[in-house]
Image (cartoon, helix red, strand yellow):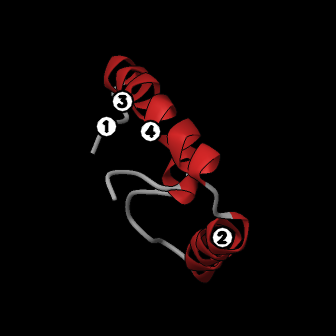
């Protein structure tokens, strides 16, 4: 996909510690357990907002 639950919750970019990968993994597993069409729709709608926020804050990758 284009974006996931982890990325929208700030778990993206370089992995600097074990804690980073654990957080991403937990969010990815949560996505798998809670998957529903509406969750995907929510992620899809949130993607442009997150992109704009990152571009204007200088945090884009």
Label 4, residues with CA under 10 Å away: few <14, some 14-19, many ≥20:
some
Query: From where the camera sits, is residue 9 visible?
Result: no
The numbered disc on residue 23 is: 2
Vertical placement of residue 39 versus 24, above or below: above
Between tags 3 and 4, which lies in front?
4
Residue under the point 62% across and 44% down? 38
Give the alpha-carbon distance from disc 1 to disc 2, as whole Å.
20 Å
Q: Which element is circle 2 on?
A: helix
Q: Earlier in the sequence, mark 1 or mark 2?
A: 2
Q: Earlier in the sequence, mark 3 or mark 2?
A: 2
Give the alpha-carbon distance from disc 1 to disc 3, as whole Å.
8 Å
Label 3, residues with CA under 10 Å away: few <14, some 14-19, many ≥20:
some
**Residue positioned most to the top:** 56
Label 2, residues with CA under 10 Å away: few <14, some 14-19, many ≥20:
some
Q: Is residue 54 left or right of residue 61?
A: right
Quadrant holding the C terminus: top left
Q: Which element is circle 3 on?
A: helix
Contact (Cβ within 8 Å) of mark 1 with mark 4: no
Contact (Cβ within 8 Å) of mark 1 with mark 2: no
Q: Which element is circle 1 on?
A: loop
Q: Position of residue 43 (x, y in %)?
A: 52, 42
Vertical placement of residue 51 versus 52, above or below: below
Give the alpha-carbon distance from disc 3 to disc 4, as whole Å.
11 Å
Give the alpha-carbon distance from disc 3 to disc 2, as whole Å.
21 Å
Between tags 4 and 2, which lies in front?
4
Per the image, the residue denoted by label 4 is 44
């Amino acid at each position: 996909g284009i974006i996931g639950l982890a990325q929208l919750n700030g778990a993206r970019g370089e992995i600097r510690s074990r804690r980073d990968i654990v957080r991403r993994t937990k969010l990815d597993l949560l996505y798998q357990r809670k998957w529903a069409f509406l969750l995907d729709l929510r992620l899809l709608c949130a993607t442009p907002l997150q992109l704009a926020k990152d571009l204007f804050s200088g945090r884009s990758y």
